[in-house]
Amino acid sequence: MYGNAADRPERERRYPTDMTDGEWAEVRPLLPVPGWMHGRGGRPEAYCHRQILDAVRYLVDNGIKWRAMPADFPPWDRVYAFFRRWRDHALIQEFHDRLRAQVREKLGRDAEPTAGVIDSQSIKADAVVGADSRGFDGGKLVNGRKRHVVVDTLGLLLGVMVTAADVGDRNAAKELLARVADAHHRLNLIWADGGYTGSLVEYCLATFALVLAIVKRSADRRGFVVLPKRWIVERLFAHLMQSRRLVRDFERCTSSAEAMVYWSMIGLMTRRLARQRPQRG
């Protein structure tokens, strides 16, 4: 039996993105359990999940095409089928959220956050991105898509939504904050920049019981200034830019673009878990 049930030790670790034994020890108990292990039908998968996870991590980090998957990984179409299944059934979010809870607890925090930061990032889109999901951001002069994200105070992802680049931050924030507030019931405070001012502040308080605190840049300050709380989400964007698959949007559908962001954060958190020691509160 393969899949979740057993490891395939014959593949040696050779790429920087391959999980170490320490990472795999942290990851394996958190993987969603397939239905056949609970007697709900189906059959064991043909490839070990560790190999599949390493293959997806390699693709995200190196920005390769699916068909360019190295030969020592499982066949590219099997890896893509795994990626698509986890994307369509929200298993990638489930796995990501379990990892985030583990990271927070090992840092002495509660598993569920009470505060977060919201922001957006415009990114150029590849030619495969259709006109129905791309646009032009006049402020950033970017033709492509926009990533709207909410992070906790540790810079860990709470939610992501990918839209055309011409979608306004306030309009996208209503839908994104609805998702985040529904998934994180303890959340009560969100920091944001000046692009989220206006009626959105009252809307968040009345609809989601969220306080939207606007962090503005002082008018008398010139040059680069580190603004309180807002640097946390900028650090997440800097991490995403280290994944070559995310430097430009290559995904045909926005759900795949969102899944790629989750996979990038999964790589970050597994490395943190492998090197962290539990801290006392």
Image (spheres, rainbow, N blue to C red):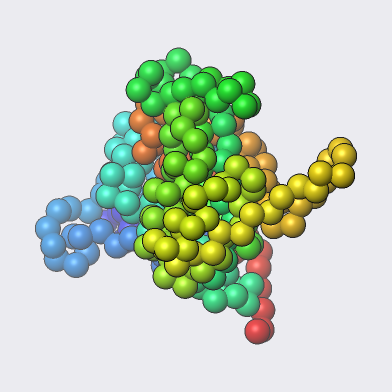
Residue 13 horizontal side relative to residue 275, left or right: left
* Res. 45 visible in picture: yes
Quadrant in which the N terminus appears? bottom left
Q: Position of residue 271 (x, y in %)?
A: 61, 56
Q: Position of residue 15 (x, y in %)?
A: 59, 40
Residue at (14, 53) in percent of width and height: 42
Residue at (28, 44) in percent of width and height: 88
Along the line of sight, the residue nearer the viewer: 197 or 279: 197
Residue at (84, 41) in percent of width and height: 224
* Res. 263 visible in picture: no
Residue that sits furthest to the bottom in the current view: 281
Residue at (36, 30) in percent of width and height: 253
Residue that sits furthest to the top in the current view: 127
Task: Give the number of marks.
Answer: 0
Q: Position of residue 232 (x, y in %)?
A: 67, 54
Quadrant in which the C terminus appears? bottom right
Q: Position of residue 8 (x, y in %)?
A: 40, 52
Residue 126 horizontal side relative to residue 238, left or right: left
